[in-house]
Amino acid sequence: MTIAEPTVDAGERYSVFPFYICMDVSESMSGDPISAVNKQLPLLRASIGGDPAVAEVIRVAIITFSDTATSVLPLSDLSMVDAIPELAARGRTSYAAAFEHVHKVIESDYLAGRSAGERWYRPAVILISDGRPTDEAGRWQAALSRLTDPSWKRRPNILAFGFGDADPAVLSAVTSAKANRAFVAAQGADPATVIPELLGGLVQSIVSSSASVYGGQAQLEAPELSSMRAITVDELD
Amino acid sequence: MGRLVLGLPSTASDSEPKLAHLGEASCAAVRADGASAGWVTVRAASVAGVRHRLAGQHCDDFYAWSLGEDLIALAVADGLGSIPGSSQTAARVSRAAVTAATGAAVAGGAGEPAVAMRAAFSAANAAAAGGGATTLVLALVSRDGRVEVGRVGDSTAFILRGGEASEMFPAPADDIVGTETLALPVVDDASAGGGAALQEADFWEASGDALGVGDVVVLASDGVADPWRDGPQTVGPAMTGLVTGFPSPLDLAAAVDFSRQGCHDDRTLLCVWLSPG
């Protein structure tokens, strides 16, 4: 649930840096992994929403995906959100559903934000997955191509994080554009250990990214994670 | 006195900064100047952005001017905070640009501002070498009212005339905000390895106008320029009214330190008027 934001005078614009957290909630996330996610997500609200210098610029949406994708938290100023919805695991791992949904909400959020006086920095998508896509490769790749199409002005930058059965080659493909990065945990790493560090690092990433807005080069800052290694796009080849 | 609020207020800008373990005047969060030289008058204000102040860090903006016989050169530089050492780069570049401009004007005659502009950017680019990166906007104002401006990056210049402000460079695209800022040093492909100054085409944007009595040229870092453009009912009229009213340096600094949601960058305004007669 969110609280209504104050209205803006006509013609006035305010800078916004949107983050879309795309969280895999497929059946394999049930048990300790999804419990860890539900324990950590409120910290995101406390850390980002509790710092006015960050919260005034950063907007966060949470999208879950399994067989389908759903916006569980619409793009929000976290200082005005009173609770993060609890997530539940179910179904398979449709990357296509995630990419199609995030494309649709970025477009609609941008248009709504623009009419509400927002001036957007390029949106960031944070993809977190513990598995391989269960779609046909052609379908999720087509959805990814549409999401990252250079001719689409709202195309996001993407950070992808994988653990469990996530496939480094797939994550590399997802983040093959210049500004994007992918990270994967070691095989066999305990998700209950990886997830808290990942979401803690994500908070730091968002805070650093918000600070970069004022450094002359707004950029999506990747977190430093001891339990994950960065995948270079060269691994694709 | 409360902070001027322009649009939605910023909660962050009213927070008390943390007292740093060390402080000194050269790291002042607020700087202001004002002076006249018969034919020309200058006002300047620079304030550290909310993010810098709350973190106990100094302002990465810098301003400088150099007064010649018939020409004054004025510069605003905005060091890129994402690159270490950029505040010092902004200082070096500003000083080098204005000094080179007035030096070239003396040597070549004030009748050739293009020569002064070229000398200024060449010197600025050379001064930017050695670490850090910075934007630069430079104005050359002649005693006869000619104004030439040049820039690299997103710092900009406005001209205030008849109570209206117009930007002297093209405004940024109106869609998604760009995430990369042009900055000095600029190195051409041929000299990229050695970092030598460019020898060929101009690497700065240029514009010009004629200044009448009562008109004001305002150089601005993006910390002011962005909200100026984004606040056509708030920041724009407030800044235009303030500057047109010939403020004291302290009044200018207080106004530049306005509160506005999400506007936390360092802010600098450097204003120049021709005096009557």
Image (spheres, coloured by chain):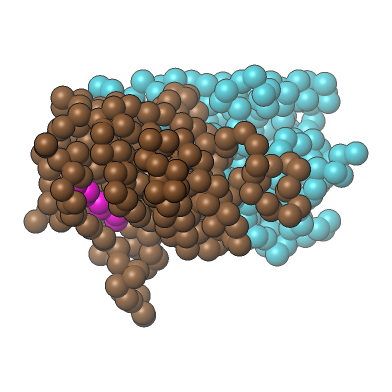
Chain colours: A cyan, B brown
Single out the residue that lies furthest toward the right. Answer: A237
Quadrant in which the N terminus of chain B appears: bottom left
Looking at the picture, tell me which residue is in the foreground, B260 or A21: B260
Q: Is residue B21 above or below residue B222?
A: below
Q: How many marks?
A: 0
- Residue B186: say if magenta: no
Q: In the picture provided, is A117 more to the left or to the right than B97?
A: left
Res B184 seen here? no
Quadrant in which the C terminus of chain B appears: top left
Look at 22% across and 57% down and name the residue there. Answer: B33
Q: In the picture provided, is A197 more to the left or to the right than A53?
A: right
Looking at the picture, tell me which residue is in the foreground, A134 or A186: A186
x and y percentages locating residue A84 in the rendered image: 45, 45
Res B188 seen here? yes
Looking at the picture, tell me which residue is in the foreground, A226 or B209: B209
**Helix, strand or loop: magenta stretch:** strand
Q: Is residue B265 above or below residue B218?
A: below
Bounds of the magenta segment: B41-47
Which quadrant holds residue A151? top right
Looking at the picture, tell me which residue is in the foreground, B168 or A35: B168
x and y percentages locating residue B179 in the rendered image: 54, 38
Look at 41% across and 37% down and name the residue there. Answer: B113
Look at 31% across and 39% down and name the residue there. Answer: B141
